[in-house]
Amino acid sequence: MSAFRAFFQKELREAARTHKLTVMGLLFLLFGIMNPLTAKILPEILSSVMPAGMSITLPAPSATDSWAQFFKNIPQMGLIVLVILFGGIMSNELNRGTLTQLLTKGLSRKTVVLAKYTASALIWTAAYALCFVVTYAYTVYFWPTDIVHSLLVSSIGLWIFGLLLLSTLPLGGVLFQNSYGCLLLTGGLVVILYLLNILPALQPYNPVMLSSDNMALLTGQRAATDFATPMIVTIGLVIAFLSTAIVVFNRKSL
Amino acid sequence: MDILQINHLQKSFGTHNVIRDLSLSIPEHAVFGFLGQNGAGKTTTMKMVLGLIQADAGDISVCGEPVRFGETKTNRLIGYLPDVPEFYGFMKPVEYLHLCGEIAGMSAKEIVTKSEDLLSLVGLAGIRKRIAGFSRGMKQRLGIAQALLGEPKLLICDEPTSALDPVGRKEILDILRQVRGKTTVLFSTHILSDVERICDQVAVLHDGSLALCGTLEALRQQHRQDSLLIEFASQVDLDRCRFASALSVYFENAIITDTTAILRTGELFKAESDVIVYLAENHILPVRLEIQEPTLESLFMEAIQ
């Protein structure tokens, strides 16, 4: 246990000193501020750039628009930045050989995978929570009376989807031993999930729902219970990816 | 007791047989020089001892305990210094040793006192900058500190001096000399002078098995050829000796280059005294007269032929 704690702390210290923490914090804070702000001022911007004499009628912005920005920015940009920042956590160490000394000191390979995953998941969770809280605060401030449905379930769904992407990184690292291979595995997984989503029979189980149908949940087109099955599938996949990473890593010659 | 025992070890990568049949044992408190050409399998052997690479056949035991591939318990008895140790550049040396100590399960107090001792042993005490700014020599010294942190019974160093300048090499060898007596050292290299400086036993790995193994002294004795080297001041002096009837018997099989003659003989003592008597009687003063010892280089070259 002390080995896990020590290695976990090392991961957090690494994230802090290599500025990953700063990038994540600032970026997600920026998203948090931009989401409601964009929703609020977009109509004004649009009408101001219209040529004179032309007018455009847009519905008044609402809390839903603010959350639409949230559920667009995080999957499209936030998750990509997350995966790029943490894509090399495993492969870099294997490439450079920094793990060799620690493994020969009795650090178990399982601990390496789990501590790395826990640290990256914690940073993702903190950044995501920051973005959520800021968006929430501004949204309530701008549109105090607006009601959105199942906001918590919807945002937990997206958070779990982020955890799924992170769980592919240690596996990619031990399989390909370079960060491009890692990104390929993560990107490949997303592509496969989207391809599978073409089949209507699989849609109720597909983790993709957690990152794409958030607005449907907020506007009441989907029920919160629809998210339950993909959440369970996603958590199952996370466990499967991490276990596979441990098994593959254990058999690897260093 | 033998600290390290290797029996009939085999390892191949694809069709390439790196280790064919390697058996080796290292007694306690030895400084064991592990020699071999590049690619002879020294690193592979060491990594098998550490459980980082799986052996195809044979067994390895450290202090009587068997080594298993993967998470082997025997590693708590071993300190390992890779050929080019890699560190986390964002850490300071004290922080790195702290991480190593926690992973090895040492108590906080133990870590602090041991780290201080070791950092001053390797000359890094008081260095507060991050490892990213370290020179190769400093990294190598920190590597020794981390390897010695758990007070290992066996210290494995993989070519610790190969990448260093003469000053860095001397520092590493001095540190290794200081820790002999506390621990057994297995030290791979292809720098023969380093071996002569600190090792008491050597083994030469060639073609996947040991071509030579034993104490340096015993090997020298075994491979000693009775030969006498005389270097003359001039060609004239050499020829005078060469064609002298008293010495002609020794010069029959002599190897002569320029002004130097190497005499090979079964009776070294008699040959030497005959030569000295003749030189003295004829007032010939040689530049050099010596009984040739086999050098490690000649032993090594002979072993890998």
Image: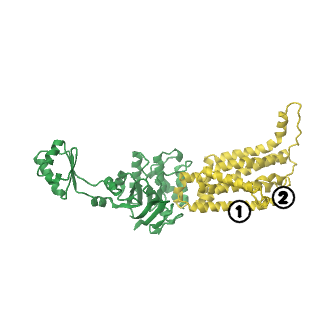
Residue A122 seen in the figure:
no
Where A130 falls versus B58 (above or below)?
A: above
**What tint does the image give chain A?**
yellow
Q: Which mark is residue B212?
A: none
Amino acid type of disc 1? Gly
Q: Position of residue A168 (x, y in %)?
A: 66, 56
Q: Residue furthest top?
A: A52
Q: Quadrant of the N terminus of chain A?
A: bottom right
Task: Tell me which chain the residue with mark 1 is part of.
Answer: A
Amino acid type of disc 2? Ala
Q: Residue furthest front?
A: B15
Q: Which chain is green?
A: B
Pick whichever of labels 2 and 1 is earlier in the sequence.
2
Find disc 2 in the rendering and name its residue.
A223
Q: Position of residue A233 (x, y in %)?
A: 73, 61
Q: Position of residue B217 (x, y in %)?
A: 30, 59
